[in-house]
Image (spheres, helix red, strand yellow):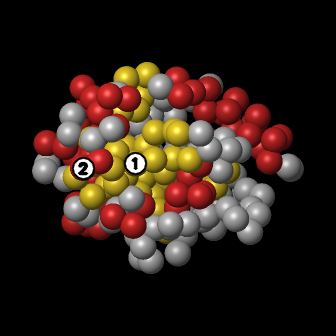
Amino acid sequence: MDKNQLRRLARQARQSQQERDRLSEAICARLHDLEAFRQARRVLWYVGARDEVATRAAITSSLTADQSVAVPYCVGDDLRLFDLQSTDELVRGAFGIEEPAEQLRVDSDRNVTPEQVDFVIVPGLAFDLAGGRLGYGRGYYDRTLERLREGTLRVALAFECQIFDRVPMEPHDIRMDLILTERQAIDCR
């Protein structure tokens, strides 16, 4: 199956997922059980949109636990990272995804580089047991993930319906270290 066929299939599976909020809570609880997550000083979160695993409540939890939170936003073909202080700083932006308000991004003290991140939570459409990830096709995350410090954990949050036998991978595609679903933690290392 090629990437576009798999994207369609994965979107359909995710859109038909029942009880998304309850399952998202279970997936995020599994994340909070990870020692590496609890020890991370700066976590790069994605802000869940549409039918993705919802992350907003978990982001709020990280902020109240005194964990430094970075969130992405798009500038052209690049993903930039922002030091989030409160979820009140998020507004609907590119692709309908919540991101930091533009007037806050000019503060250079709030810019974060991928090298400053200890733990990354990655979205995607489809995953396989070897850590293969199929994103939305623009390469934003792959370009950012390749700049992480060695040893930085890359963790995908996904519904069980997003796990496939094989995800087509190209040389520039970055594999996940862990995939957390409502049923399992898949160690891909």
* Residue at x-position 19% and y-position 53%: 67
Residue 175 image-quadrant placement:
bottom right
Instruction: State the image coordinates of residue 134 (x, y, percent, origin top left).
Output: 67, 50
Observer able to see residue 25: no
Instruction: State the image coordinates of residue 115 (x, y, percent, origin top left).
Output: 39, 67
* Residue at x-position 80% and y-position 48%: 3
Horizontal side of 76 relative to 24 (left or right) equals right
The residue identified by callout 2 is 109
Q: Nearer the viewer, residue 31 or 4?
A: 4
Q: Amino acid at mark 1?
A: Leu
N-term mark: 2 or 1: 1
Instruction: State the image coordinates of residue 181 (x, y, percent, origin top left).
Output: 48, 49
Q: Nearer the viewer, residue 126 or 173?
A: 173
Horizontal side of 50 relative to 15 (left or right) equals left
Q: Amino acid at mark 2?
A: Asp
Residue 174 image-quadrant placement:
bottom right
> How far apart in space, not on screen, are marks 2 and 1 (Cα)?
11 Å
